[in-house]
Amino acid sequence: MKLLEVENLNTYFNTSKGQLKAVNGVSFDLEYGEALGMVGESGCGKTTCALSIAKLLPKEGEITGGRILLEGVDLASMPESEIRKKRWKDVSVIFQGAMNALNPVMKVGDQISEAIVLHEKGSKEAAKRRTGEILELVEIPAARGSNYPHEFSGGMKQRAMIAMALACNPKIVIGDEPTTALDVMVQAQILNLLEKIRKEFKMGFILITHDLSILGETCDKIAVMYAGKIVELGTVEDIFERTAHPYTQRLIACFPNIRGEKRIPEGISGSPPNMLALAPGCSFAPRCDRKQACCETLEPVGKQIGEKHFAACHFALGGGAIE
Ligand SMILES: Nc1ncnc2c1ncn2[C@@H]1O[C@H](COP(=O)(O)OP(=O)(O)OP(=O)(O)O)[C@@H](O)[C@H]1O
Ligand code: SF4
Ligand SMILES: [Mg+2]
């Protein structure tokens, strides 16, 4: 059985200007110990996808279709009362700048213990012991649990938040830009740490970022999102070496080549579409230099172009003709 199977997920927001299809037919899966990277421009639906899986959507957001199977059990249709028991246990999320969520007037260790007692319902002593273990796991000496957040560096604070996210042994951890606020060295240390823990405990990991080059280093596979959809999905090699979708090509061109020569990032001309008024056809068409007449009327569906490689483009490289 797969750890996670997301099937045709639709999450919409009800806004004063109408319905916004933030996640629109997203499908992917995750094995035990596997890491999926999710990348795309601002507003393409990455966080909404994460919040849907963790069932942490704000009240104006709603899962209107699809399934989120965690070890075969559908979270999408699970009642709120059941979900509350699962939250922080099976799926936990590390948000961007999470370190700022630490309570400044409470010792770091006490904050972690409190979260454990709240979710595990065990004794305070057991929670304290677990706190020490989990701090050591994120490479913070257990004794530092008696420090206040201001006595920690930025990287240590973020590691403390990771400890909090791991405290109840989740099956899946979602990092939503978990290292964006940190400098490059600390960012690399934290990503290495997460990789080590994921492999050791066979946890599923979803890493959300704007920076495609980070995903090549830390993930097994990558989902490229555009306007609420996954437009390309594949292994790291599929995405970087057999790039099929014009948008992925442009994203790769945006980032300095991590392995080879340095080059000037090109940027992607044009703006992302208005998610409240998506035109028919392919959402990327206004910015695509490969578009043909059919792209503006016919919406491309994901087609398989390799063993684990999918792209939603009428003219995906390696895919050939219009479906
Ligand atoms: N609470 C909300 N109410 C209405 N619309 C929302 C809400 N949250 C997000 N949206 C909209 O849903 C779409 C997807 O947003 P989301 O935050 O998931 O994107 P993202 O890919 O995470 O972007 P970023 O990279 O900026 O974090 C956007 O158009 C956004 O404006
Ligand atoms: S379907 Fe057409 S417009 Fe869309 S990405 Fe492919 S070639 Fe470009
Ligand atoms: Mg986001």
Image (cartoon, rainbow, N blue to C red):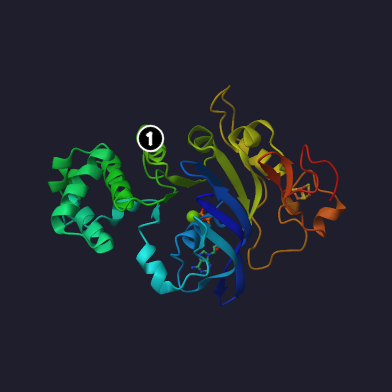
The image quarter containing residue 183 is top left
Q: Can residue 119 be seen in this view?
A: yes
Percent from the top left, x then y, of residue 16?
56, 77
Q: Residues within 10 Å of mark 1 (few under 14, many from 20)?
A: some
Residue at 26%, 41% in the rendered image: 156
Residue at 69%, 45% in the rendered image: 310
Percent from the top left, x then y, of residue 209?
50, 46
Q: Looking at the picture, does residue 232 appear above or below residue 23?
A: above
Amino acid type for the residue under numbered disc 1: Lys
Q: Looking at the picture, does residue 297 appear above or below residue 193?
A: below
Q: Looking at the picture, does residue 262 appear above or below residue 229?
A: above
Tell whether 159 sits left or right of 113.
right
The image quarter containing residue 240 is top right
Which residue is labeled 1 in the image? 196
Tell whether 80 sits left or right of 111.
right
Percent from the top left, x then y, of residue 279?
74, 63
Tag 1 secondary structure: helix
- Residue found at the far top of this picture: 261
Percent from the top left, x then y, of residue 120?
26, 60
Q: Is residue 253 visible?
A: no
- Residue found at the far front of this picture: 1
Q: Establish whether ligand 3 lies closer than 8 Å to the Cβ of label 1.
A: no
The image quarter containing residue 238 is top right
**Of residues 277 and 171, the one drawn nearer to the viewer in this rendering:** 171
**Of residues 28 and 104, the one drawn nearer to the viewer in this rendering:** 28
**Of residues 189 and 30, the one drawn nearer to the viewer in this rendering:** 30
Q: How many labels does the image show?
A: 1
